[in-house]
Amino acid sequence: MLGLNLAELKRCIERFAGRDGVHPTGIAPLSLFRASAPSEPAQGVYEPALCIVAQGSKRVMLADEVYRYDPAHILMVSVGLPVVCQVIEASPKSPFLGLHIQLDPGQIGELFLAEGPPERPGRPQRGLAVSRAEPPLLDAVVRLMLLLDSPRDIRVLAPLVLREITYRLLVGEHGLQLWQIAAENGHARRVAAAIRWLRDNLARPLSIEALAREVHLSPSGLHHQFKAVTAMSPLQYQKRLRLQEARRLMLSEGLDAASAGFRVGYESPSQFSREYRRLFGQPPQRDLALLRTACQPVQGERRAVS
């Protein structure tokens, strides 16, 4: 059953993603990705999503942790996380084929209320995990893909299938991640609120004490729970977001390094350059020169989360 579902997914992605790159579809949360060669590591932010590979394999790095997934495994993300991603198996004859389904927090909350929490909620779970690809989940994903052949059915049927996919994730191997984010008073949900605050206030100075009060945790509790979910401290998380946004501003809006650094909250250009080089391996000007020589592949990979 698993093999049949993967074969059907592969055929569908090949039909609707005939060339390399990211391909949006008529089903808004669903996008497809194809690559005919391995990619360079690329920085990006993964939003809550289900990512499936029908052919090839991909590597995702969260802080110092490395996750690899392939046709036998899925990747699930429950909160926004800054990561490094890389296609590691792909060729013109056997391209990387993947899909990405954005998860709806509102739908997760509805299912949480309908089904109730797990008996043992446990400690906060990492916001990113790789698990086995189960036939019932893949069957629902195949049915979602096949709706692309029937555009008139998408408006009515796609929400039902997306709800089933979310349910399959909730009762699956790493469903506790999603349950915890939906739990009204859970620590993981408070971490998710802290993440939203950091992303909405990127350029503001970070006070751990103030952020802890904002999400109703103690400073030590915030640090511990935040690291459990994201594999990094709030300060490390903010720093990665700032540097990634500064890189985007320089590449897409033409800002110089000092202006981009100031825009994301750095007051010292030298500190910005040091931290930029530490994360991206090159000082800003050299990094941008290298990026512009291969601008399209880098931008495509940045958006792709399959």
Image (cartoon, helix red, strand yellow):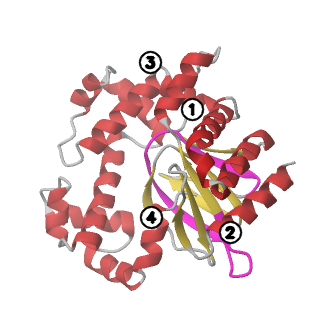
The answer to whether residue 222 is left or right of residue 202 is: right
Q: Position of residue 130 (x, y in %)?
A: 65, 46
> Which residues are drawn in magenta?
71-97
- Mark nearer the viewer, 3 or 1: 3
Q: Position of residue 220 (x, y in %)?
A: 35, 26
Residue at the spot of label 3? 184
Distance of mark 4 from mark 3, alpha carbons? Answer: 32 Å
Distance of mark 2 from mark 1, alpha carbons? Answer: 33 Å
User: What amino acid is found at the position of numbered circle 3 in the picture?
Assistant: Glu
| Mark closest to the chain's N terminus, 2 or 1 | 2
Q: Position of residue 125 (x, y in %)?
A: 55, 32
Q: Residues within 10 Å of mark 1 (few under 14, many from 20)?
A: many
**Was residue 61 drawn as part of the magenta stretch in this picture?**
no
- Mark nearer the viewer, 3 or 2: 2
Q: Secondary structure at mark 4?
A: helix
Distance of mark 2 from mark 4, alpha carbons? Answer: 23 Å
Residue at the spot of label 1? 177
Pointer 1 and pointer 4: residues touching (CB < 8 Å)? no
Distance of mark 3 from mark 2, alpha carbons? Answer: 42 Å
Position above or below: 277 against 50: below
**Was residue 88 drawn as part of the magenta stretch in this picture?**
yes
Residue at the spot of label 4? 302
The image's mark for residue 15 is: 2
The answer to whether residue 216 is left or right of residue 272 is: right
Q: Residue at x 33, y 38 (%)?
A: 196
Position above or below: 57 against 45: below
Q: Residue at x 56, y 21 (%)?
A: 112
For the image, the number of numbered tags is 4
Pointer 4 and pointer 3: residues touching (CB < 8 Å)? no
Q: 111 or 180: which is nearer to us?
A: 111
Distance of mark 1 from mark 4, alpha carbons? Answer: 24 Å
